[in-house]
Image (spheres, rainbow, N blue to C red):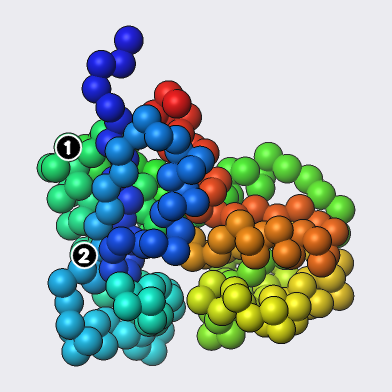
Amino acid sequence: MRTTRPIVGLVTIGQSPRVDVVPEMAEVIGPGVEIREAGALDGLDRAQIRALAPQPGDEILVTRLADASSVFLGKRRIVARVQEKIGELEGAGATLTALLCTGAFGRLAATRPLVQPQPILLGVLRAMSWPGRLGILTPSAPHVPQTEARWRADGFDPVVVPLSPYEEDDPAAVARAADALRAARAGLVVLDCMGFRKKTRDELQAATGAPALVANLLVARVLAELCGV
């Protein structure tokens, strides 16, 4: 019988707390679990963050800052900071940790269970079949080429549509994304960024008629299972 409360550490590539997505994840994980957050950009000023911007050849990531603004980062420039935050959360008592980014980071080091979203998405999709094409929602137009290349390398034929998770409250932007997915006959949609919320999932499902997966909620369900709640 478990005698201590599980502690889940959540590592964002931006700044914590992620008040935009963690509350929805917490609802799925359940009240019997303590959630602690850390961010790869915590404590950095604007000049330090600008120094992490993508350079030619970098994989582009986008994330949220504590003031609710968003920034683009070069993935290779923040891996060490992400790794540091995993270690900090484990050192502070986290039972397990999870990365709040769907980018392909490779295997990160951890002394306790670590959940990485991108392999979870791949595993779920490889266990499924659906009519039509795979629809992928990516956070910006600059993300489209790299996102399409990554999903093709993983064996899928995606239609990749840009929509910033930080403009989800713009009905016109969501409608444009839904129109593009519907025109491409997407039979399943993946919201390929941890910043997307279930509100957008529901709107896209209603507009396209296709089921949709929200990465952060899928990860939350895995965490809940690992915590035995």
Give the x, y percent position of residue 216: 50, 53
Callout 2: few (<14), some (14-19), or many (20+) C-alpha neighbours within 10 Å?
some
Residue at image location 38% in from the left, 89% down from the top:
56
When the figure is inspected, residue 121 is found, relative to residue 78, above or below; the finding is above
**Residue 155 in view of the camera:** no
Q: Is residue 66 left or right of residue 149?
A: left
Q: Nearer the viewer, residue 172 or 90?
A: 172
Mark 1 residue element: loop
Mark 2 residue element: helix
The numbered dot on residue 93 is: 1
**Residue 198 in view of the camera:** yes
Residue at image location 66% in from the left, 48% down from the top:
125
The numbered dot on residue 48 is: none
Q: Indicate the quadrant where residue 106 lies.
A: bottom left
Q: Indicate the quadrant where residue 127 lies.
A: top right
Give the x, y percent position of residue 74: 35, 78
Give the x, y percent position of residue 84: 18, 57
Pair 2/1: label in front? 1
> Quick one: which residue is furthest to the left in this view?
91
Q: Indicate the quadrant where residue 184 lies.
A: bottom right
Q: Which residue is mark 2?
A: 81
**How many numbered callouts?**
2
Figure quadrant of the N terminus: top left
Q: Earlier in the sequence, mark 2 or mark 1?
A: 2
Give the x, y percent position of residue 40: 25, 66
> What is the spatial separation of the Cα atoms under label 2 and label 1, in whole angstroms?
19 Å
Residue type at tag 2: Arg
Residue type at tag 1: Gly
